[in-house]
Image (tube, coloured by chain):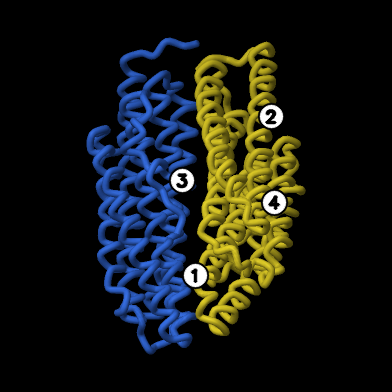
Chain colours: A yellow, B blue
Amino acid sequence: MQQQTGHTLKAFDEDMERLRALISEMGDLAQEAIREAMRCLAERDIEGALRVVTRDKEIDALEVETDRRVVQLIALRAPMAGDLRDAVAALKISGVVERIGDYAKNIAKRVPLLSSGSEVESVSLLPEMARIATEMVTDVLRAFVDRDAEAAVRVCERDAAVDDFYESIFRALLTHMMENPHNIGQSAHLLFVAKNLERVGDHATNIAEMVYYAATGDYMAEPASRDRRKKAV
Amino acid sequence: MQQQTGHTLKAFDEDMERLRALISEMGDLAQEAIREAMRCLAERDIEGALRVVTRDKEIDALEVETDRRVVQLIALRAPMAGDLRDAVAALKISGVVERIGDYAKNIAKRVPLLSSGSEVESVSLLPEMARIATEMVTDVLRAFVDRDAEAAVRVCERDAAVDDFYESIFRALLTHMMENPHNIGQSAHLLFVAKNLERVGDHATNIAEMVYYAATGDYMAEPASRDRRKKAV
């Protein structure tokens, strides 16, 4: 295998820096999409929701661009050990950010399916849940850019709060359905909205685990990780 | 950049062959997990469902092993062009197979939450939906092993059937909820089971797109791909 020169190393670092910036840009679009989808849901803004759906293609395009650059980076710079791990992490993380964008799109797609007689207000916890999940995405991408393993651990720890919100909302919606059968269609859609937000938290956790691994070469210790306490409601 | 010798090329092909076999093994475990989770759901086999949840760790471990080997393969063999694309596809596909395993686990986790008075029978379409989704996984992994782009296109075409099943089941469950509020909790869980199966179909489609790209270097034409017809119920 070729020996890496100082020049190659520097070039790798510069390419990797640009890659991190690109993924961070994807993350900004994904967070903005979640926030906008939730605003459209609350205000029954069908036009706005359609724009969220359309704009998801920008995130998809950035994933394709990230993949292309990672492959090019590996082919040109032949990184080893920690650098190769970093490049592969970038590839995996961009895939997860793309899925976070999909969840925003899925939430937006439900807006036209909700009737105008709003029941969203009855699920007052939903906006707060969305806020925490979106913040997890912001913070985990900052941790990725900064290669900050400790910040990644703190992101994982907040996933429990998102899960608790989800369980409360699940129960509130079921009660709501039982009280009045007319609420059932509406509430079923909101169940999926809550589930999508819960998955956003899970995916932020996944990214945090990848950031931790890329930064340290070790897997994150179990207690901070999601599997132990994960419930299925 | 180093020139690849005949020896290196052959070694790459052998490594890649083993990698395909490993991912195929992951796929077998994931399909088996879906089938077993659906059996446990139908028979209210809580013990069996717990085994499905526990065995998901085997799939997770295979993903870690695949990632390790891809990184090693790239570092040792420095593949270029189509070979590098193949190695990166293996990495991405193993990630998707791992998520298919997660859907099986999620279905299994709902088994203990369903009351013994079974409502599953009322959703007679669920086993058939599971069968098609599982077959898509089988066929797309065979297409991956065979590098068969045409077979990958055929897998995508079947995702419409899974989506149709999902919509029918969604409506059947809502009707069921409206008829009797006592069915609401049960049916809400089954809504998520149906959604998980629909996602399995989506993920098989994602893998098919990756197989197509790895085999041809082109992106699959839109009509076979899922985004055009995707609805949000």
What residue sits right under mark 1 in the picture? A185
Q: Are marks 3 and 2 in contact (CB under 8 Å)?
A: no
Task: Please state the horizontal and vertical placement of residue B206, each as a whole percent of the image.
Answer: 39, 42
User: Is disc 1 surrounded by few (<14), some (14 to 19) or many (20+) residues within 10 Å?
Assistant: some
Q: Secondary structure at mark 3?
A: helix
Q: Secondary structure at mark 4?
A: helix
Q: Nearer the viewer, mark 1 or mark 2?
A: 1
Could one spot residue A218 in this view of the protein? no
Q: Secondary structure at mark 2?
A: helix
Q: Nearer the viewer, mark 1 or mark 4?
A: 1
- How far separated are the C-alphas under marks 4 and 3? 23 Å
What residue sits right under mark 2 in the picture? A21
- How far separated are the C-alphas under marks 1 and 4? 26 Å
Task: Please state the horizontal and vertical placement of residue A83, each as a whole percent of the image.
Answer: 62, 29
Task: Please state the horizontal and vertical placement of residue B189, each as a whole percent of the image.
Answer: 46, 73
User: Is disc 2 surrounded by few (<14), some (14 to 19) or many (20+) residues within 10 Å?
Assistant: some
Question: Which mark identifies residue A134?
Answer: 4
Q: What's the amino acid at mark 4?
A: Thr
Disc with the residue nearer the chain's start (1 vs 4): 4
Could one spot residue A58 in this view of the protein? yes
Q: What's the amino acid at mark 3?
A: Gly
Query: Which residue is pictured at 41% across the width and 84% down the height?
Result: B179
Question: Which mark identifies residue B95?
Answer: 3
Q: Nearer the viewer, mark 4 or mark 3?
A: 4
- How far separated are the C-alphas under marks 1 and 2? 41 Å
